[in-house]
Amino acid sequence: MFTDIILTLTNFITQTISNLGYTGVALLMAIESAAIPLPSEIIMPFSGFLVEGGRFTLLGLALAGAVGSVIGSMVTYALGYYGGRPLILKYGRYVLIFSHDLELTEKFFQKFGKFSVFIGRLLPVVRTFISIPAGIGKVPIWPFVFYAFLGSFIWSYFLAWLGFKLGENWQTLESYFRRFDAVVVIVIVIVIAWWIRRHLKNRLK
């Protein structure tokens, strides 16, 4: 079953990006930012890899990633704003949001205030959940959107750039890795496996 989940997520990410282009990137990043386990560390580098072939541009990917992230962040922001901490603790486990995730981001938010929305969007793990304490803390909507967009744009551009650099130098690496598809699938499977294992392990705790 664990393998089936990994393969399903892998196929979903690659097929969505391949079929829907920028819209697919925005959709996937919205899902990820809504605290549903779908790592941006796979979404954006895979998209960036396709820049070399002319499918995307780095600026376009950064914009799509940022727009999608803001849309997804609005979901968790609204949950925190209207439902508060009790709602998150009661139902969050169904989308693999656990108390330790909430506590981590709450401490981060208490330290940096509304500016934490910008900083948090640049950090793995924290970026997914930072909208929740921002909502609970009643951060005004427009500053929230601004900081979330800015941080997400930088994060998306950076990850897409990493994927682009890999694609740009693929001719050099080709002698070591004969099949592009195999390498991409292996990397995606490893990252998603780590992602799922982390959340399931925390759920068992």
Image (spheres, grey):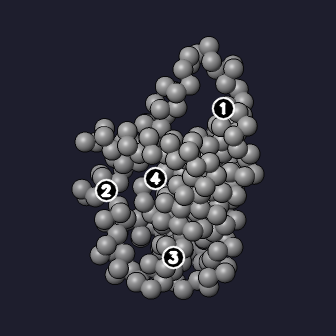
Q: Amino acid at mark 4?
A: Leu
Secondary structure of the residue carrying numbered label 4: loop
| Near-viewer residue (152 or 65) | 65
Quadrant of res 63: bottom right
Per the image, label 2 sits on a secondary structure element best described as: helix
Disc with the residue nearer the chain's start (1 vs 3)? 3
**CA–CA distance in space, label 2 to label 4:** 16 Å
Q: Quadrant of the C terminus?
A: bottom left
Residue type at numbered disc 2:
Asn
For the residue marked with disc 3, what is the amino acid? Tyr
Label 3, on which residue?
77
Q: Which residue shows up at 60% across the image and 68% down it?
A: 70
In the displayed image of the protein, which residue is found farthest to the front? 19
* Marks 2 and 4 in Cβ contact (< 8 Å): no
Q: Is residue 61 left or right of residue 95?
A: right
Evaluate whether residue 108 shows in this view: no
Of the image marks 4 and 3, the number of the one nearer the N terminus: 4
Residue beneath disc 4: 38
Q: Residue at x 69, y 73 (%)?
A: 146
Q: Which residue is mark 2?
A: 202
Q: What kind of residue is marked 1?
A: Leu
Q: Position of residue 42 (x, y in %)?
A: 53, 44
C-alpha span from label 1 to label 3:
35 Å
Query: Label 1's element?
Result: helix
36 above or below 76?
above
Which badge, 3 or 2, comes first in the chain's sequence? Answer: 3
Hey, which quadrant is residue 74 in on the image? bottom right
Lateral position of residue 117 relative to residue 191, left or right: right
Disc 3 is placed on an element classified as: helix
